[in-house]
Amino acid sequence: METKYTAQDYKKGQPRWCPGCGDHFFLASLHKAMAEIGVAPHNIAVISGIGCSSRLPHYMNTYGMNTIHGRAAAIATGCKVANPELSVWQVSGDGDGLAIGGNHFIHEIRRNVDLNVCVYNNRIYGLTKGQYSPTSPKGFVSKSSPFGTVERPFIPAELVLGARGTFFARTLDVDMPTTVDCMVQAHQHKGASIIECLVNCVIFNNGTHACIADRETRAERSIVLRHGEKMIFGKEKDKGLALDYSQGLIPQIIVVAADDERVLTHDATLQYPTLHRMLAMMGQDGDTTLPIALGVIRNVEAESYDEAVNQQINEVREKSKAKTFDQLTQTLEQWEI
């Protein structure tokens, strides 16, 4: 008889984040998503680095590991390759995952390791008390940039697609239905599934995602993309997205009436990422003319790294005469000292 799990089966401990921190919302969404996915707690591993978000494994009734700063991707990759049957989740912040861990982040995407990676983006270093991060907007005033940062920020979606990512989703801490749906689809995807989680830091960067977190403006400033559905948004569902070819060779996304025949239907499975990139870049770098895209933006199939490694190991084993480690060492070049 199949065991039916509930969100409670995945809960452990008392979260120690600040009251009102967006991490509380994502933890609740992850518990609920786990119950929908239905994988037994002992077949799940949650790996994190260092930072506020990286406390999450302590609150999961699963296997888990709080690693060192920026190295969650390396540990998670090894975990998945060594035990392909595990459902492995990686939790990183915009500092842990995109600064000190940025190189690992790029290559886990390029390799397409079958991991579910949640990047909590609050545009600040919270645990170390308020320094600007790789995703802080240009001009952002913080303890480490008192006159405003002069750096251009990373946009996680652009980084993922540039690394040939096969799955990218974006969601908001206060939107549980969309968050749970993204997490379920991430688990179903075979490969590196990246979810950018837009999180509010009530202490050091309160209101950083206010334009879409605020109920009064969310419907007008964001659009939830769903595969196979028309790109419709707005408080009255009266607006749609279309492509405008009048500005030259490169089309531009524009807002049209919802009943316009040009309104696009979302296809997350397009192999060529141009349109996915255009959708993911809407509303970025201060742009207010287009809504910010939420939901699963890209979801394409490709061979995963862990499958390829294990297939190679099995093929070599079948061809090799050495069946034990001792026999293997005898087949290698040796020398005496």
Image: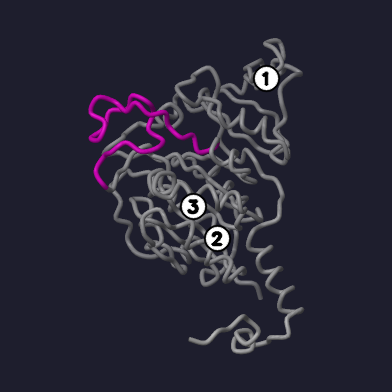
Q: Which mark lies nearer to you, 1 or 3?
A: 3
Q: Quadrant of the N terminus?
A: bottom right
Name the amino acid, label 1: Ala
Name the amino acid, label 3: His
Residue at numbered disc 1? 258
N-term mark: 1 or 3: 3
Residue at numbered disc 2? 35
Picture coordinates of residue 304 (x, y %)? 66, 57
Q: Quadrant of residue 226?
A: top right
What are the residue bounds of the magenta stretch? Answer: 128-157
Residue at numbered disc 3? 104
N-term mark: 2 or 1: 2
How far is disc 2 from disc 1 in space, using C-alphas? 36 Å
SS class, disc 1? loop
At 48% across and 86% down in the image, what residue appears? 337
Outermost residue on the top side: it is: 246
